[in-house]
């Protein structure tokens, strides 16, 4: 068992390691913190402010779309996206169906041929289809993928103004993700931020205030270890699976908090020409993960193969105290509990009653969260099979990215990409219906987008998880794993 002195020493080493990086970056504001317009004031951003503006704007989606493409237009759109799956709450499936039904009522003469893929399959499918000139006309893709597809020449230039909206009505961090060499190739549909989720009962049993999360990442390590020692339960739901988006979405906030990064994406004006994976901040964050996984054994051994989906069942069974995820996780837990019976159902209900959400911990440099989300893209006619109906595609994108459906499609999961969505009556309904939504929304101004370069997906989904695996399996020290990853990125970018 680790002694209190050993733990204090480890925290001291991490803080010292992060110190130089923190000094260089503490003044830098996340790109997402730059204020959009759309009738919202990011300088006042807080749960109370978001509640105060919700429900203050009426929207006529059909009228907005009609200004771009007549409602009697006849055509067809092929569309690929990551649709709801069996792990999603039923509400997501219902809203997905409502979206397509509403579009059909608005544009009764436009046919939608849609295909849904898993997150881990869609990018490879898109790459192969575009090379074979059989890409869809429209796709909804995560922020991480846009630079690569734009650089390869697959995407049509597309600005919010092309579908009747203003660029200023979208978060600058989101618009950055669809911009490549000064040109815009897509429109944000939703913006994701996450929060720390914890079991207040396990906190109390371990001697912590049940209603207060760990303030810093060093505190999280301490909480995780103490919960393991005093309750026998796992403290933190670490995710380190290779080639899974869940991994960077949970490690990078920790990495940025200590002053690290993949490149210089956390700086106020990143140039993506400096590799931060080998810096002191990244090594400190990686050491904190090693301390939890190897030294304290306070996270599940299966973290090496887990995605966030594998954390939910242990959490509602009362065997896991903390995890990072979306507001939708609460709805997922409710759904899972309803499928249980007997003692399992009683346990799940008791845990859900003790669920709490709070801000992701801060570090020596900052508090951070991935400024994630999804964008709507139109592919160039040259990579699309058959006739390309640009007006039908624009009508579909205008419908999807307006204040109404950018809000409704994000119902359980995230935030509307269109900032006018925060002022709609649907946002007011969401706040009332989706517990803890205001907490994750308040993390928006701490959001940092992944590097806007074609190699970003490989760096985040392969290099970063490989770095974690090298360290967590003991093949390398934190310094060796970080330096190896930094070299891989330098070689990949030829820096």
Image (cartoon, grey):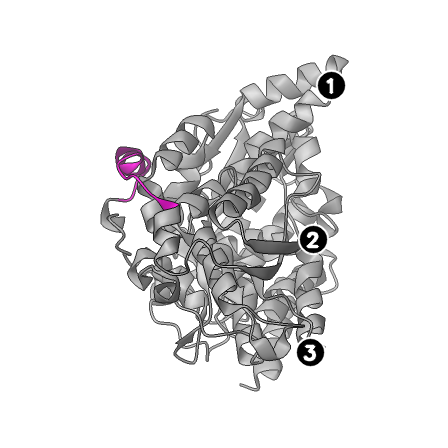
- Say if 235 sits above or below 23 in the image: above
Q: Secondary structure at mark 3?
A: helix
Crowding near the residue tagged with mark 3, few <14, some 14–19, many ≥20 C-alpha atoms within 10 Å: few
Q: CA gap, disc 1 to disc 3? A: 49 Å
Nearer the viewer's eye, disc 2 or disc 1? 2
If you read the primary sequence from the N terminus, does the residue marked by circle 1 or circle 3 appear first? 3
Where residue 207 appears, as percent x and y from the top left, is 52, 24
If you read the primary sequence from the N terminus, does the residue marked by circle 2 or circle 1 appear first? 2
To which residue does mark 1 refer?
A: 344
User: Any mark on residue 118, and which?
Assistant: 2
Q: CA gap, disc 2 to disc 1? A: 29 Å
Is residue 441 or residue 374 the one in the foreground?
374
Question: For the magenta stretch, what is the residue range?
Answer: 45-61
If you read the primary sequence from the N terminus, does the residue marked by circle 2 or circle 3 appear first? 2
147 with respect to 28 (left or right): right
Crowding near the residue tagged with mark 2, few <14, some 14–19, many ≥20 C-alpha atoms within 10 Å: few
User: Any mark on residue 403, and which?
Assistant: none
Q: Is residue 243 visible?
A: no
Residue visible at 69% across and 49% down in the picture = 294
Crowding near the residue tagged with mark 1, few <14, some 14–19, many ≥20 C-alpha atoms within 10 Å: some
Residue visible at 39% across and 35% down in the picture = 426
Is residue 104 or residue 467 the one in the foreground?
104
Nearer the viewer's eye, disc 1 or disc 3? 3
Where residue 215 appears, as percent x and y from the top left, is 42, 40
Where residue 377 appears, as percent x and y from the top left, is 52, 65
To which residue does mark 3 refer?
A: 131
Residue visible at 73% across and 52% down in the picture = 304
């Amino acid at each position: 068992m680790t002694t209190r002195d050993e733990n204090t020493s480890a925290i001291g080493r991490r803080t010292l390691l992060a110190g130089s990086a923190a000094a260089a970056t503490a003044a830098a504001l996340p790109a997402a913190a730059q204020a959009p317009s759309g009738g919202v004031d990011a300088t006042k951003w807080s749960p109370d402010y978001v509640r105060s503006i919700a429900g203050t704007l009426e929207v006529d989606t059909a009228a907005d779309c009609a200004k771009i493409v007549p409602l009697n237009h006849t055509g067809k759109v092929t569309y690929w996206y990551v649709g709801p799956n069996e792990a999603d709450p039923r509400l997501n499936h219902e809203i997905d169906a409502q979206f397509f039904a509403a579009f059909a009522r608005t544009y009764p003469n436009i046919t939608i041929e849609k295909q849904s893929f898993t997150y881990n399959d869609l990018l490879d499918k898109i790459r192969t289809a575009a090379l074979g000139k059989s890409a869809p006309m429209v796709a909804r893709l995560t922020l991480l993928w846009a630079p690569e597809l734009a650089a390869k020449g697959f995407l049509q230039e597309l600005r919010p103004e092309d579908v009747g909206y203003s660029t200023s009505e979208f978060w600058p961090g989101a618009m950055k993700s669809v911009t490549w060499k000064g040109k815009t190739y897509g429109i944000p549909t939703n913006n994701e931020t996450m929060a720390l989720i914890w079991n207040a009962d396990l906190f109390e049993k371990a001697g912590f205030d049940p209603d207060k999360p760990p303030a810093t990442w060093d505190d999280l390590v301490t909480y995780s270890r103490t919960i393991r020692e005093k309750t026998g339960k796992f403290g933190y739901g670490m995710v380190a699976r290779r080639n899974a988006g869940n991994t960077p979405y949970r490690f990078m906030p920790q990495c940025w908090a200590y002053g690290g990064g993949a490149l210089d994406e956390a700086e106020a004006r990143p140039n993506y020409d400096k590799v931060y994976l080998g810096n002191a901040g990244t090594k400190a964050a990686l050491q904190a993960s090693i301390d939890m996984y190897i030294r304290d054994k306070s996270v599940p051994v299966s973290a090496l193969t887990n995605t966030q989906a594998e954390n939910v069942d242990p959490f509602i069974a009362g065997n896991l105290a903390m995890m990072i995820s979306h507001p939708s996780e609460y709805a997922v837990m409710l759904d899972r509990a309803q499928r249980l019976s007997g003692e399992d159902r009683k346990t799940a209900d008791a845990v859900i009653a003790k669920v709490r959400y709070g801000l992701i911990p801060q570090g020596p440099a900052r508090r951070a969260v991935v400024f994630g989300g999804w964008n709507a893209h139109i592919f160039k006619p040259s990579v699309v099979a058959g006739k390309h109906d640009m007006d039908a595609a624009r009508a579909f994108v205008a419908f999807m990215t307006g204040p109404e459906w950018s809000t409704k499609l994000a119902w359980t999961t995230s935030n509307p990409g269109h900032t006018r969505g925060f002022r709609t009556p649907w946002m007011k309904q969401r706040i009332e219906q989706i517990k803890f939504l205001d907490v994750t929304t308040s993390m928006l101004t701490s959001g940092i987008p992944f590097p806007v370069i074609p190699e970003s997906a490989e760096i985040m989904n392969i290099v970063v998880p490989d770095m974690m695996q090298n360290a967590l399996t003991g093949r390398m020290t934190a310094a060796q794993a970080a330096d190896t990853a930094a070299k891989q990125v330098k070689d990949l970018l030829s820096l």
